[in-house]
Amino acid sequence: MLSPKSTELVEATLPAVGAAIAEISALFYERMFAEHPILLRDMFNRGNQANGTQAQALAGSIAAFASGLLAGRTPDGMLRRIAHKHVSVGVTPGQYAVVHKHLLGAIAEVLDVTDEVAAAWSEVYWLMADTLIGIERFLPQGQQEHRVIARFQETEDVVTFVVRPIDGPVRAGEPGQYVSVQVPLPDGARQIRQYSLSGRSDDALQFSVKRDGEVSNHLHDHAPVGSTVTVSQPAGDVTLRPGDGPVLLASAGIGCTPMIAMLAELAATGSARQVIAVHGDRDQLTHPFRAELAQLVAKIEDAQAHVFYERPIGEWPAVRTGFVDLASVPVPADATAYLCGPLPFLRAMRAQLLGAGVTDIHYEVFGPDVISAG
């Protein structure tokens, strides 16, 4: 809880901080990476830094946390997502002090605030940081070298990797979770990206990678069977919740990976729940796990699939043309909805579900979370 004086100052300056947050974030990252270049080289996504989405997400999360404090609530969902991402990439408690130094310095420089205002925002930051550190302390941490024991070409630009720890047992993840994979790049950087678990296995981890960006390209081109990759413990809080109510699994593109893992779990456990699987893609050839989707839905007593292709090839009577539109899909208001896909898809699905009275919505987004931050 914020102190009374800090509450007053944060409430008075929140609009100004919000209006200048893009400038503050840009300066913050510039200052931090100048002093700690290894963070940009090995931890932060260079693509997200270049296009500004990382700054937008960080800014939005701090503003959202401050707004929550003023309203007497904590954005728990946002904090859990951040905490899981942090442990998956190896953020340490000591790095919070580094962020604090440069973030508060950027706020002070951009807004020319008084020492009292700077202290108030410092209090906000440490309340958020301490909450995250507390959550992260109880999450599985650590990265291990894994050997690639199999790989499968799902589509022209999607490959599934099956990996096993070189030393020690595998920690099986839950359906919906992801792993962080770190690879060495030609310029000496060791960049990290997250990939959803896409299948069930007792002694290995399976994740699928779309060719898109420097880490994904490296895995496609330089991770044959027998090679090694550095993989984190499974992380992520968007997992299949227990219960007997209806389930909606909605995805687009490579966002099908956590959904196919959840569907496989429902099929393997003989679930009696109503399951509605919805997927959108460009066409049949770009749709990963197309055959598995049909096979898994057929194994579940009360399940149905709704597939949308923007430009289907040939005549496909069971496929709808265009983007995913939940208006044409019967989704019960008491359904638990899981979403994964590009940001425009997530925003559209969330809006459609809320409009239909569905409020139990969970989503996974890779890269900066500008939905909860926005």
Image (spheres, grey):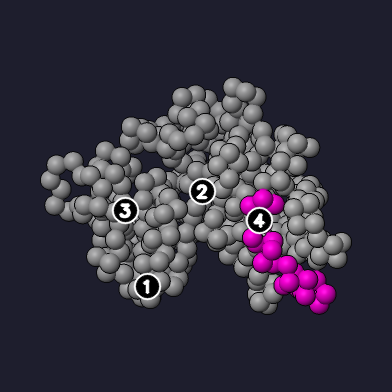
* Of callouts 4 and 3, the N-terminal one: 4
**Residue in the image at 56% along x and 48% along y:** 53
At label 3, which amino acid type do we have?
His
Distance in Å between CA atoms under marks 1 and 2: 25 Å
Q: Secondary structure at mark 3?
A: strand
Residue found at the far right of this picture: 115
Q: Nearer the viewer, mark 4 or mark 1?
A: 4
- Residue where numbered disc 2 is placed: 366
Relative side of 233 to 12, left or right: left
Residue range highlighted in magenta: 1-24
Instruction: Give neighbour class at mark 2: few <14, some 14-19, many 20+ (Cα, 10 Å).
Output: some
Q: Label 1, on which residue?
A: 355
Question: Sequence-wise, which precedes: disc 2 or disc 4?
Answer: 4
Mark pair 2, 4: CA separation: 22 Å
Q: Are marks 4 and 1 in contact (CB under 8 Å)?
A: no
Three-letter residue code for mark 4: Ile
Name the spot of residue 196 as percent of width and height, x first. Answer: 48, 46
Q: Is residue 34 magenta?
A: no
Earlier sequence position, callout 3 versus callout 1: 3
**Badge 3 vs badge 2, beta-carbon distance below 8 Å:** no
Mark 1 vs mark 2: in front: 1
- Residue 21 numbered mark, or none: 4
Secondary-structure class at tag 2: loop
